[in-house]
Image (cartoon, helix red, strand yellow):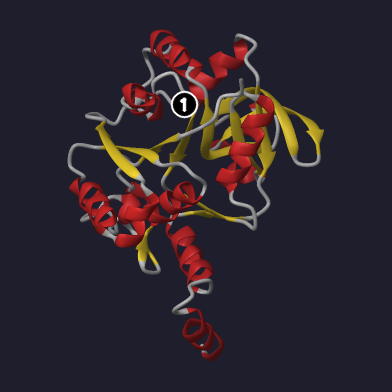
Amino acid sequence: MKTTVKRAVLLVAGKGTRIMPLTLHQPKGMVGIVDRPMIHYIIDELASNGIKKILLVTSPKQPQFKKYADYLQKDPEWKTLGVKISFAVQKKPIGSADALLKARRFLGPEPFLLYFCDDLLDDQTSPTKNFLNLFQKFQHPILILEKIPKNLIEKYGVVKAKKITGGLYQISDIVEKPKIKEAPSNIGAMGRYLLTPEIFKYIYKAQTLMKDKKEIAVADALKLYFADGGKAYGWIFKGEHFDAGSKIGILKAQVHFGLKHPEFRQQFLRFLKNF
């Protein structure tokens, strides 16, 4: 019997240093994009695709997320969706792998979606829907991929992958933030994954083997998973991708989602044309 995906984890504990001073008084995930915090776009995408159980991994001093979740739960429209938002706390910022460990009890033995809050995506077909469809087919971890300009390769987890068909790839390795000459390709992984419970075994292994690293990433655990012969798949995302962890990414997202907003788009379009 094929396993279905019912849960998602959002890692939102980051300090948002790249977009200071916006994050002096609020977490990065609560920075506004048009009329909603950026995290709402991801929660809304998940809920629209049947993911009803969502866990936010926060830092100790981020009460804003709980306040926002309480606001959503009181909204009549959200009540009908039946979405339940839970919380776990990462006490120290020692990497995304450690943050994911805080969600283990919530996840149990099920496959799950893992999203970072600052990758805002928009496409005709929801990325979450693609994740769920591909997992039903392959029953292995799925990653969203994108082609990376050479000057940005050192900022990404870069994959070694074999093209299957169209934009679909089978992945056999990942290298976190490699030097250009050491990168296995020009294809990088975005901050969105569909993972299976096996990943926890490799997080513990990474923590043992990489004791000297200040921060251990999920990509480090995936690299060990691939070294053991683990399979994963990914597709090249061709929609709009906004790095909302950067100031220019936030500006671009404001324009894109502002022009799609049912209430403001006509006024905003007139303003831009006049400008």
Question: x, y percentage for residue 34?
Answer: 40, 69
Residue indicated by mark 1: 218
Residue 211 visible somewhere in the drawing = yes
In the image, what residue occupies the spot 63% across and 24% down?
139
Residue 144 visible somewhere in the drawing = no
Residue 97 found in image quarter: top left
Q: Is residue 97 above or below residue 202?
A: below
Q: How many C-alpha atoms fall within 10 Å of the one at disc 1: few (<14), some, or many (≥20)?
A: many
- Type of residue at label 1? Val
Question: x, y percentage for residue 86?
Answer: 28, 38
Q: Secondary structure at mark 1?
A: helix
Q: Nearer the viewer, residue 273 or 50?
A: 50
Q: Give the tally of numbered discs.
A: 1
Left or right: residue 226 compared with residue 79: right
In the image, what residue occupies the spot 50% across and 15% down?
198
Question: x, y percentage for residue 69?
Answer: 27, 50
Q: Is residue 196 above or below residue 71?
A: above
Q: Quadrant of the N terminus?
A: top right
Q: Nearer the viewer, residue 233 or 181?
A: 233
In the image, what residue occupies the spot 64% across and 53% down?
125
Residue 12 found in image quarter: top left
Left or right: residue 88 compared with residue 166: left
Left or right: residue 31 compared with residue 183: left
